[in-house]
C-alpha cells in the first residue's frame, strides 16, 4: 500500500529538528525507519511531516563513559551488537540487538528508534528496563522506568528528541541472557525475557528481569526478582520463575492467547535465569 502524503525535512541542526517537531503535533522523527515505514505503508500512521534526524552528529556514536556506555540514538542494531564498548560493558544489550529481526533490518534500524517507537513486542525496551538505562534527550534525562508510558507512547514531549541511551555497567559477578520465542527471524517476539543475574557463593544475590510483549509496555518481573533473592540454583529457581507473569496483562492475537503468553513467560524466564547464572 502507498503511504498517505507527507512533507519531508532533513534538518541541519538539532535545534531545527526540535523546532519543526514542536511546531507540528503530527510530525514524526525518521532515522532508520524500520519501525515507522511499515506503519506508513499500512496507513496505520498519518504524519504530516517526517523529520529525518539520521544526519545529526549529536545522535551518533558509541562511547565508554566509565561507569556507563553511551549509545547514540542513531547507532544501528548491527553497530551495537558489534561494538567492543557494548560487548565488554553491557553484553545483554549486544545479545538482544543480535536477535532483532534479520541482518537487513539490523543494518538500517536504529537503537534509539526502537526505544522511542516503544513497541512492547520489541526486544530492546525490556532490556533497557532491566538494566535501568537512562534516556538522554535534547532537554533532560529520563530513567527507563519512567520512559515507557503506554502502547507506542513514551515520555518524550513536543519537540523533544532522544539523543542516546546511557547504559550502566553492572560489573563483575553478573551474568546475562536474552531468551526469545518467535515464529520466524523477522517476526516480533511472542514473548521475550531479558535477564541479568549476580551470583555469590552458589546463590543468587540479585536478579533483574525485563519482559517483552507481556503488556502495553515492557515490564519488570518484580515478583520473580524478589523470590530469586538469596535463592540457590535448583528447585528454588523454578518456583520463583513460576511467578514471572504476575502483574502482567498480555494481549490476545493471531499468534498467542494471554494464557499461552503467561506460560511462555514462566518457561523463558527460567531458561534466561539459568543461562545468565551459568547453570544448565
Image (tube, rainbow, N blue to C red):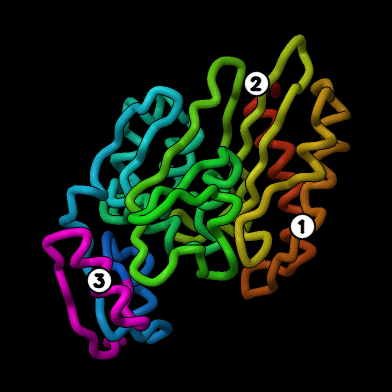
Which residue lies under the disc numbered 1? 262
Q: Nearer the viewer, residue 174 or 73?
A: 73
How far across and down, in percent of the image, does residue 19 sit?
25, 71
Q: Quadrant of residue 257?
A: bottom right
Q: CA distance from mark 2 to mark 3?
A: 49 Å
Give the number of the disc on residue 205. none
Whether residues under marks 1 and 2 lie with C-beta atoms below 8 angstroms apart, the answer is: no
Determine whether, in the image, residue 51 is placed left or right of residue 180: left
Q: Nearer the N terminus, badge 1 or badge 2?
A: 1
Which residue lies under the disc numbered 2? 278
Q: Quadrant of residue 275?
A: top right
Q: Which residues are magenta?
A: 1-28
Determine whether, in the image, residue 207 is placed left or right of residue 7: right
Q: Nearer the viewer, residue 102 or 117?
A: 117
Q: CA distance from mark 1 to mark 3?
A: 43 Å
Q: From the viewer's perspective, is residue 121 above or below residue 62? A: below
Q: CA distance from mark 1 to mark 2?
A: 24 Å
How far across and down, in percent of the image, does residue 119 sit?
51, 64
Whether residues under marks 1 and 3 lie with C-beta atoms below 8 angstroms apart, the answer is: no
Q: Nearer the N terminus, badge 2 or badge 3?
A: 3
Residue 23 forms part of the magenta stretch: yes
Instruction: Rate crowding at label 3 as few (under 14), some (14 to 19) or many (20 or more) other CA atoms within 10 Å.
Output: some
Which residue lies under the disc numbered 3? 19
At mark 1, the secondary structure is helix
Q: Residue furthest left?
A: 12
Of discs 2 and 3, which sits in the foreground? Answer: 3
Instruction: Rate crowding at label 1 as few (under 14), some (14 to 19) or many (20 or more) other CA atoms within 10 Å.
Output: many
Amino acid at each position: 500500500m502507498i503511504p498517505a502524503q507527507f512533507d519531508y525535512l532533513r534538518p541541519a541542526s538539532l535545534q531545527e529538528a526540535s523546532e519543526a517537531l514542536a511546531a507540528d503535533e503530527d510530525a514524526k522523527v525518521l532515522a532508520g525507519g524500520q519501525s515507522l515505514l511499515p506503519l506508513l505503508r499500512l496507513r496505520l500512521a498519518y504524519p504530516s511531516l517526517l523529520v529525518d534526524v539520521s544526519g545529526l552528529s549529536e545522535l551518533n556514536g558509541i562511547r565508554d563513559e566509565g561507569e556507563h556506555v553511551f549509545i547514540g540514538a542513531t547507532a544501528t542494531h548491527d553497530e551495537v551488537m558489534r561494538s567492543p564498548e557494548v560487548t565488554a560493558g553491557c553484553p545483554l544489550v549486544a545479545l538482544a540487538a543480535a536477535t532483532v529481526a534479520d541482518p537487513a533490518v539490523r543494518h538500517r534500524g536504529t537503537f534509539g528508534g526502537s526505544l522511542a517507537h516503544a513497541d512492547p513486542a520489541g526486544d530492546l525496551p525490556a532490556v533497557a528496563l532491566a538494566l535501568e538505562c537512562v534516556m538522554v534527550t535534547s532537554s533532560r534525562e529520563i530513567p527507563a522506568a519512567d520512559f515507557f508510558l503506554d502502547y507506542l507512547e513514551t515520555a518524550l514531549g513536543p519537540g523533544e528528541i532522544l539523543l542516546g541511551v546511557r547504559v550502566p555497567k553492572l560489573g563483575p559477578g553478573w551474568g546475562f541472557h536474552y531468551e526469545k520465542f518467535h515464529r520466524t527471524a523477522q517476526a516480533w517476539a511472542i514473548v521475550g525475557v531479558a535477564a541479568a543475574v549476580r551470583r555469590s557463593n552458589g546463590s543468587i544475590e540479585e536478579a533483574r528481569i525485563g519482559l517483552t510483549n507481556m503488556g502495553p509496555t515492557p515490564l519488570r518481573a518484580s515478583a520473580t526478582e524478589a523470590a530469586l533473592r538469596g535463592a540457590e540454583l535448583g528447585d528454588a529457581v523454578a518456583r520463583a520463575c513460576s511467578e514471572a507473569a504476575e502483574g502482567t496483562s498480555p494481549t490476545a492475537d493471531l499468534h498467542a492467547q494471554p494464557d499461552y503468553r503467561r506460560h511462555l513467560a514462566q518457561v523463558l524466564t527460567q531458561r534466561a535465569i539459568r543461562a545468565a547464572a551459568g547453570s544448565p
